Image (spheres, rainbow, N blue to C red):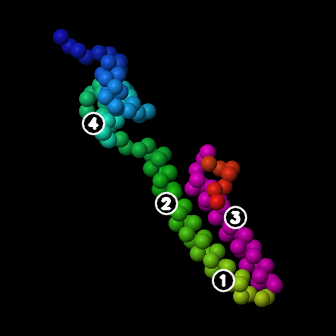
Amino acid sequence: MQEREKGPPVRRMAELIKSGATMLSENCPDCKVPLFRLKGEVFCPNCGRRVLLVRSEEEVAGAAATVALTGVEETIMARITGLNERLRTETDPEELQRLGSLLSMWLDILGKVRSLKAGPGRTGTAAP
Ligand SMILES: [Zn+2]
């Protein structure tokens, strides 16, 4: 007698949930049954095999973008610090105006970088 069922092994899944496993939003790449996580291990209740959860390409790209943006942010912060030093000692009004608009530009970019880092859904209220 074959016990193989078509569709998700509902009984098995119910048992897993009872034993403390978490049903994930990701599906098994082979049988499309929802994956479960138990004690840090992700597996398919249908195939009974462990699945290595690879984050979506979007998430990987997002993480890379955050790293890149942090680099940009550091550069801008260094620029702003340098500008601040010059603003403190500069006496020529024209130069001060030039430095001021530079500072304004860097602050503008910094704001954009930070809102990009915060990602969608977290725009609007700026964290202190
Ligand atoms: Zn499977």
Q: Confirm if mark 4 falls within 8 A of ligand 1.
A: no
Amino acid type of the residue that numbered disc 4 sits on in the rendered structure: Arg
Provide the secondary structure element on which disc 4 rests.
Answer: loop
Q: For this rendering, which residue is in front, 54 or 11? A: 11
Q: What residue did someone put label 1 on? A: 85
Q: Position of residue 110 (x, y in %)?
A: 64, 64
Q: Is residue 49 left or right of residue 74?
A: left
Magenta-drawn segment: 93-121
Amino acid type of the residue that numbered disc 1 sits on in the rendered structure: Glu
Number of numbered tags placed on the structure image: 4
Asked if residue 12 can be seen in this view, the reply is yes
Q: What residue did someone put label 3 on? A: 108
Residue 65, above or below 41: below
In space, the residues marked 3 and 1 are separated at their CA atoms by 19 Å
Residue 106, above or below 62: below
Q: Is residue 68 left or right of residue 111?
A: left
Provide the secondary structure element on which disc 2 rests.
Answer: helix
Q: Position of residue 97 (x, y in %)?
A: 79, 79
Q: Are marks 4 and 2 in contact (CB under 8 Å)?
A: no
Q: Are marks 1 and 4 in contact (CB under 8 Å)?
A: no
Q: Are marks 4 and 3 in contact (CB under 8 Å)?
A: no
Disc with the residue nearer the chain's start (4 vs 2): 4
Amino acid type of the residue that numbered disc 3 sits on in the rendered structure: Asp
Provide the secondary structure element on which disc 1 rests.
Answer: helix
Instruction: Decide whether the magenta segment is chiefly helix, strand or loop.
Output: helix
Q: What residue did someone put label 2 on? A: 67
Asked if residue 51 can be seen in this view, the reply is no
Q: Confirm if mark 1 falls within 8 A of ligand 1.
A: no
> Where's the C terminus, which quadrant?
bottom right
